[in-house]
Image (cartoon, rainbow, N blue to C red):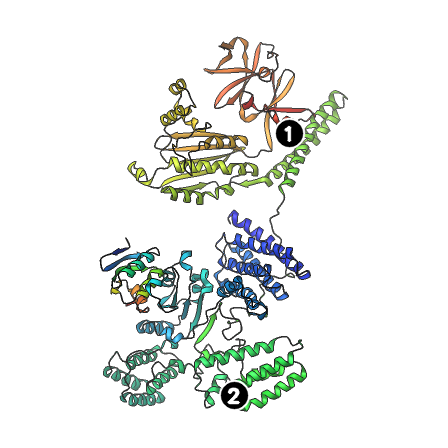
Amino acid sequence: MPIIYKKNKAIFNEIIGVEEAEGLLEWLHQNPRGKIDLGSCTHLHAADLQVLMAAKNLISVQPVDISLAAWLVSTDIY
Amino acid sequence: MNQLLEQFLSEAREFLQSIAEKLLLLEKEPKSTDLIMELFRLVHTLKGNSGLFDLPEMTRVLHASEDLMEAVRSGNVTYSVLLADTLLDAMDFVGMLCDELEANGNIDASHTSESANLSQMLRQLIWDVNNAPVCEEHDHESVLLNEFYRKEVIPKDLVQQLSRVSEPIRLAAFSSAMQGEPLHWLCYTPSEDCFFMGEDPFFQARQTPGLVGGGITPREPWPKLAELDAYRCVLDFHVLSLAPLGELNEFYRYVSDQVEIVTILPRTLIIPQGDLDESPVYVDFVTEALHLLHQGDREGLSLAVQSMQELANPELWISSALRWIVLVMTSGQEDSDEILKVILNSMQSCIPPEWTATKKEPSPAQPSAPVHDQTLCVESQQIPGAGGLLSDAMDVLVTIVAAQREILALPCDVSWLAGRINGVASVLSGCLGIIGREDALSELRKATESAVSQGTAAPVLEWLNRTFPPNTGQQGMPSPTIAGVKPILSPTGKQGVGVGANPARIPSSAQGEVKFGRRAEDSFLGTKILKVDQVKIDRLMNLIGEMVVAKNALPYVSGRAESVYGVRELSREIKTQYAVINRIAEEMQDSIMQVRMMPVSFIFQRFPRLVRDISHRLGKEVNLVLEGEDTEADKNIIEALGDPLVHIVRNSLDHGIEPPDIRRSASKPSAGTLTICATRESDRVIITIKDDGKGINPDFIKQKAYEKGLIDEDRLNRITDQEAINLIFAPGFSTADEVSDLSGRGVGMDVVKSAVEKVNGSLLLESEKNAGTCISLSLPLSMAVTNVMIVASNNQIFGVPMDVVVETVRVPRKDIRSIKNTQTTVLRGRIIPLKSLNFLMGMNTPPMASDEDELAVLVVQHGGEPVGVLVDDFHETVDIILKPMTGVLAGLAAYAGSALLGDGSVLMVLNIKEIL
């Protein structure tokens, strides 16, 4: 599973595809205070990204992947 | 080049030709709905065809043309000469792409911008009309169109966007750009439904060549999560890249209408960021630094900056500015003094990121935009009040001036010219008022008066060019206002209205100047391919057939000349002439057959896709190997082969090749191999389809066949494995218990077999359990000429196709035995059943024996078994053109057809399979 949903936390693993966006949105909707762990994420589809951007301030762990992290800095996602 | 592409190119040329013709016809009768429909259909088909290939440039232009034609067809746009010109240009462009495609096998990415520009012009034609007051009724379609052509404009807030790129990245990019690398800022605005087209714009942006940094911004404020549509893309991507423009265009060629690329000067990156601290200590520093700079004391300046850096908190805005100063000083740029001065000045005024304002400062060293003394910017600097113009206002002013220039450039042969000139004049005088150039008003008034009196816009245009000189090379666009930003590609910007394109790259716009070096007067490039109706070839074929037959009469004539008339000399001369005619006729026949020849790749082409789709559906891994694709055979044969081959391949995939896990457990590679191979063997084409799957289990087949009642119990026990395998060709046979979309209907292999036999082909199946199956199809090269053996029986002659003849033997009558009711003989240790041709044909005469009491036996192949046919005598073999039986005779299954012989007699060719 690219995204592992825990009680209050969603852990993103490696590459997150477009099909995850709907589930992610649903989860965020049900867990408005849920945190996102991007630690081992290397890429996420633009659809997932915009869900995270819309949800705001949910990132608990920044991605280790430097280039992804640099991109995310520009998005006010943190 | 592949066959499909070749075909596409030859068709595309025809389409282009007809489109041009139709357009010209339309010029004469612009109201003709038929012509418009026809034109639409042509453009539509051409677009569809181009979509088969990886030709985004071509497809885009054709798509725009199609939209335009659609608009014409639905009456939203009326036909005009401009429309025809634009369409012709577009078609010329497509023609040029075709030429390039043919010459190089691909299309250079450099055409992307031309293509974008052309489609833009085409869309402009629809857009103009939709905006015109005439078409105010907002029907559904025009609303859609409006939405479709809604434009994103060149980034106005470039600085703001750039400032989103973190400082270290900008510092690094600045240094690289100083080394001479090109610096581009790219705005990628993916379409809202791009996710549904399988795109990931974020991935695309991250893969941008030469990427240094980038940013992502939402297009609109975020809605509540509950209202968010995750699959509607609302993100814009910005990328700072060090790659050359060509590479970027190539990378974004599929979405070039969603991408805007501007070349930026490195200095644009200098945007100090950080906390503001308006402590006066900096003022002293700035004064000192400016002084040092003025004196050219670089070392002193460097020291001062260094000590200042030590003092200041690195988080401060001022430290950021200092970092930039250090970088600029070490970069060794020619005009670094200028830049330093600007940065220092901005520090002095302590106004946060001031680079925006400084953009407008005259800087003689700017390489990309030479600034003349008279330019708008300089003037606005010199005149009190105008210098304070905000950059937005400046943009507006530039836009207005450019629009006026365009209006003035319109043809002057209209009755409302005076009104037009006066309108322009009043707009311009308004502008002069705003920027405080009232002094120029009188001159403008004079120019206007002379223009109205002369009936030409030239004087005003002249004045305009004098006062607001257009930048050299950049028509209608005083560029200094956007100094540092040189628009390169703005496919989405409206033409000539401020955000116009750089004519150096995109041949300018609305005037229809675009020529792609292909006009009617240009030399006509003849195509090498001639398309001929098959009927004509068939007629040629028939004629040459008659010719061959007629020529065959000559030996008879020569024989008669000698035997009947006794003129030996003449007989010999006839024979010589016959040899010549024979040679020519044979060559002619050969070349006509060549015309009908097609490579088997024509049917092979569909297999990669078919195999891929089916194997995915079945969850199997298959490597497809195609061999001998250029083997040629007659068109009819090739066409008849298509469906049977698909059947066989499907069967191999469905029944032959096992799923990966089973294959692995059988210690085979997890991916199966399917080989389709075509070879030529003398006058036949052999096509083999071979897989390395589980093979056919003969016991299983026997059992199934028995269950289905195809064989009886007796046969079940006696049947050999090879015979059992061949049972899969029996009608009604199927091993699958359930009918799937792939197989199980029991109409598979027997259909294959009959289709192959219909074109005189034969089929051979070999299979080894767990090792694979191989099916070989043997087909004649051509159906046109048939080699038959002539046999005589009951004083008649018959033809027997040579491909069923195994051998001819004479068997002494005593060697013929009767087993039950059947006569047999033993030939090389094998029992062969004998059948009398007379009996088979319903004639009651017994076969005639020779003087030595031997019977002539023609051994033929029937269902894999030899069968002897008793005839009276054998004659020679001849090549004939077999004519199928027609009319009432078509019902006689015993004959495959008839042919004319050289002496004018008719030869009936037997269908051995039917009569046995």
Residue at image position (64%, 83%) is B451
Tag 2 subunit: B
Hey, what amino acid is under mark 1? Thr
Name the foreground residue: B674 vs B901: B674
Q: Does label 2 or label 1 sit earlier along the sequence?
A: 2
**For numbered disc 1, what is the local secondary structure?**
loop
Residue B697 position by quadrant: top left
Asked if marks 2 and 1 fall on the same chain, the answer is yes
Residue B433, numbered label: 2
Q: Residue furthest top?
A: B814
Packing grade of label 2 (10 A; few <14, some 14-19, many >=20) is: some
The residue lying at 32 percent from left, 90 percent from top is B287
**Element under label 2?**
helix
Circles 2 and 1, Cβ within 8 Å, touching? The answer is no
Q: Residues within 10 Å of mark 1 (few under 14, many from 20)?
A: few
Q: Quadrant of residue B700?
A: top left
Q: Quadrant of the C terminus of chain B?
A: top right
Determine the residue positioned at 56% across, 37% down: B636
- Residue A22: which quarter of the image? bottom left
Please state the chain letter of the residue tagged with numbered disc 1 in the rendered image. B
Residue A18, above or below B655? below
Q: Which mark is residue B886?
A: 1
Picture layout, residue B390 above or below residue B147: below
Residue A58 appears at what percent x and percent y?
A: 26, 65
Q: Looking at the picture, does residue B403 appear above or below residue B108?
A: below
Relative placement, left or right, of B424 versus B108 is: right
| Residue B623, position as x, y percentages in the image | 39, 42
